[in-house]
Each structure stands twice: as C-alpha cells, then as structure tokens.
Amino acid sequence: MIDKKNMLGVGISDATKEEVLEYVVKNLENFHKKLFFVTPNPEFLVLASKNEHFKNILNRADLASADGIGIIIAAKILGKNLKGRFTGVDLVERLCETVSEKPITVGFLGGQGGVAEKTAECLIAEYPTLKVAFVASEWVKEGFDRAKRIMNHESGSMNQGKDKKDHNSSFIIHDSNFIDILFVAFGAPKQEFWISENLDKIPVKIAIGVGGAFDYISGKIPRAPFFVRKLGMEWLFRLLVQPWRIKRQLSLIEFAWLVIKEKLSRN
C-alpha cells in the first residue's frame, strides 16, 4: 500500500516512479482486486474544491500520482513534500516498457481520429513484445458501442480467436479474457467519472486515467524537449503549442489562491 498525503482535500500518493511501477506489477502478479489510478494536476484539485462528487472519486482511487510541477511546489509550500511526480505520458510509456516482457496485456481507450491506434503502434514499435488486448478511440456512438461489445465479449470480441488483427489497426490484438491495464484518455473529469462508474462492469484489472497522453505519444501534438520537462516548464511549452489552453491555465491562479488560503489557515 502506498501512503497518501492530503492536498487541499485530495489524497496524493507519496511515491517515486519506481515504487508506483512496482506496486502496479505486484498487484497484477498477485491479483486480488481491481485498481483505479488517477493522475491529478492543479486543475483536478480546483475542480475537486467545487465538486464534492469528483473529490470523492479521486479519494477512492487506489493510486493518485501527481501530474504536474504545480502539485509538487504546492506540497512543499504546505510542508507535505512528495517524492515525485508521474505525468500521464511518462506513466503510459514506463508502464508499457515495464510490462512488455511480462504476460501482461494493455488496452487503449479514448482520444480522437484514430489516436489510440496510433499510440498503440508507436509503443509497439518501441517495445515490440508489448501485448495489446484492446484499442478503441471513440467512447460515444459507434465507437463506444464497439468498445462495449468487445469488453462484454460479444461479436468481435477479444476471445474469439488467438492474436487477431483489429479491422482498422496494423498490429495484433492479443487474445485475453482480461485487459490487465486499461489506459483511458477521455480527459478529466470525464475519464475519472467513466472509470468510477464502469470499472466493476468491465474485464479490466487496472484502469488509469491519462488525460491527453495519447496525443503526445502518437505524435499528434509535439511534446516539450526533455530539458524543458526537467525544469517543470512543460505547461509553458504546451501553452505555446496550444494557445487555446490559456483558459485552462487560468485555473493555476485559482489553484495558487487555494494553496495560499490553506497555508494562511495554518498560521
């Protein structure tokens, strides 16, 4: 069990990347319960301060790794130093690398315009032994119906034949009764609500909300250079690449105010 530290009413897992990876793999190798994994950033905590239901969902998560330098800085200000952060992109890549040599399957759900398929292709190119058991970009209308058919083992299901190619993918869909790790990229808070409502109904052992990770892994959106990420300035790079994000970045001001109020309330 990984301990959590309370950040503005939301528990954030206090763990290194290696500890998170070890925890996930151990739970899969000694499976006894499904896990729900979230990757909170400052926007999450701002929304949680306004939406009690969302806050409860985040606090029910088995793992909640900080995604973003803002959470780390706020933790220091509040005297609750965290061991580190794990962005959604890094989490997907590191987990796929870790499980690629193990009998563990992964699935990709979310994104638009075939980005889930492209993400799977890119990761298989990087880790050829990665076992992909499920891919679906859309979760509404036709795509969501297809996802449900596959997950419910109806027509076109994963267990109707060994290692079949998906009709719109260039890689092998591995036969599996369970998707060990399902990466869900609907964006917050949709993905967290969806996982919370559906995890018990679908053959998935671990479901992880990863936001826009597929867009970066697939190359749809350029990722910040490594040195920029090391400086914790990836948010600024994203803003330059996607100026429309300025509205979302305004939530950082609200987040800073929440942190200041929390700090002052203790003095």
Image: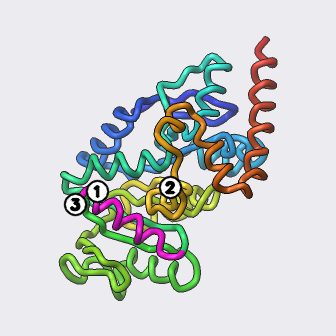
Residue 235 as seen in the image, left or right of residue 95: right
Which residue ends up furthest to the bottom in the rendered image? Answer: 155
Q: Residue at x 74, y 39 (%)?
A: 252
**How far is disc 3 from disc 1 in space, using C-alphas?**
6 Å
252 is within the stretch colored magenta: no
**How far is disc 2 from disc 1 in space, using C-alphas?**
16 Å
Residue 165 as seen in the image, left or right of residue 118: left
Q: Which residue is mark 2?
A: 213
Q: Position of residue 263 (x, y in %)?
A: 75, 19
Work out whether residue 129 or residue 184 is closer to the camera in this orientation and state it.
129
**How far is disc 2 from disc 3 in space, using C-alphas?**
20 Å
Q: Which numbered tag is attached to residue 126?
A: 1
Stretch in magenta: 113-127
Instruction: Specify which label sits upstream in the sequence, 2 or 1.
Output: 1
Q: On the rendered image, what quadrant is the N terminus found in?
A: top left
Check disc 2 and give the amino acid type: Ala
Check disc 3 and give the amino acid type: Pro
Work out whether residue 33 or residue 120 is closer to the camera in this orientation and state it.
120
Q: Residue at x 42, y 82 (%)?
A: 149
